[in-house]
Image (tube, grey):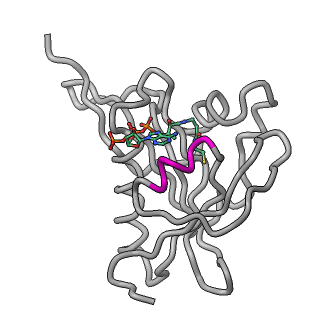
Amino acid sequence: MTSAKIEIRRVGVEKILDLRHRILRAGLPRESARFEGDEAETTLHFAAVMVEPSGQARRQAVGCLSLMLNSFLAETAWQLRGMAVEEAHQGRGLGRELLAHAEEAAASENDAGLLWCNARLPAAGFYQKHGWRTVSEVFEIPTAGPHVKMSKRLKGNPR
Ligand SMILES: CC(C)(COP(=O)(O)OP(=O)(O)OC[C@H]1O[C@@H](n2cnc3c(N)ncnc32)[C@H](O)[C@@H]1OP(=O)(O)O)[C@@H](O)C(=O)NCCC(=O)NCCS
C-alpha cells in the first residue's frame, strides 16, 4: 500500500482554522482562532497537508503557520503567527520544514529583512534552534501564557 505524503502548500485561512483552534486555542471559542490581519492582502498562510498518492489533499491541515507583514522595532518585518503542528505529528521535523518554507517565502515575497514573533515560552527553544534570538523579557499573554519576543534576520539582509 502506498501511503500519503506530507506537502507544504500556501492556503486560505479557512484550511488552518481548525488546527489553530485545537492546538493554540483549546477550550476557547472557535472564533478565537481567527487573528486580526488574517484576511489582509499581504498575509501568507501555509499548511502542511497529507496528500494521497492520487494527488488529492486531505481536508485537514496537520501543520500551519501564517506570516503577516507589519513592523518590528521601526523596521518593516514579517510577523510569524499561529505556528502549530498536530500533536500526533510533532517531533518529526514538520515544524522545521514549515519554518524553513516560511523563511524562504518571506525572503522572496518582498524586501522586508526581518522575521519576528511572540513565542510561547515552551516553544522558544524550537525557534532558537533555527537561528532566532530572544529579544525581550518574558511577558504574559492572557489565555496563552508566558511569551518572549524573538526575531531572525533573513539571509541576504545583513542589517
Ligand atoms: C513547537 C512546534 C511548532 C514544533 O514543531 P515540531 O514539528 O514538533 O518540531 P520539529 O520536529 O520540526 O523539531 C525540529 C527541532 O526542534 C526541536 N524542538 C521541537 N520543539 C521544541 C521545543 N518546544 N523546544 C526546544 N526544541 C524543540 C526538535 O527537538 C528538533 O531538534 P533536532 O533538529 O535536534 O532534531 C510544535 O511542537 C507545536 O505545535 N507545539 C504546540 C504549539 C506551539 O507551542 N506553537 C508555537 C507557538 S509560538
Segment colored magenta: 122-128
Nearer the observer, 1 or 151: 151
Residue 56 in percent (x, y) is at: 29, 29
| Residue 19 picture quarter | top right
Q: Residue at x 46, y 33 (%)?
A: 61
Q: Is residue 134 left or right of residue 126?
A: right
Q: Is residue 126 magenta?
A: yes
Q: Looking at the picture, how far across and down is residue 94, in whole percent?
A: 37, 38
Residue at the extreme front of the image, as rendered: 137
Name the chief secondary structure element in magenta. helix
* Residue nearest the viewer, comparing 152 with 133: 133
At a point 30% along the width and 40% down the height, the residue shown is 7
Quarter residue 37 falls in: bottom right
Residue 115 screen position, x and y as percent: 52, 69
Q: Residue at x 59, y 71 (%)?
A: 69
Q: Can you give x and y, in whole percent of width and height, for residue 1 in the image?
A: 14, 10
**Residue at the extreme right:** 142
Identify the residue at the far top of this view. Answer: 1
Q: Nearer the viewer, residue 133 or 94?
A: 133
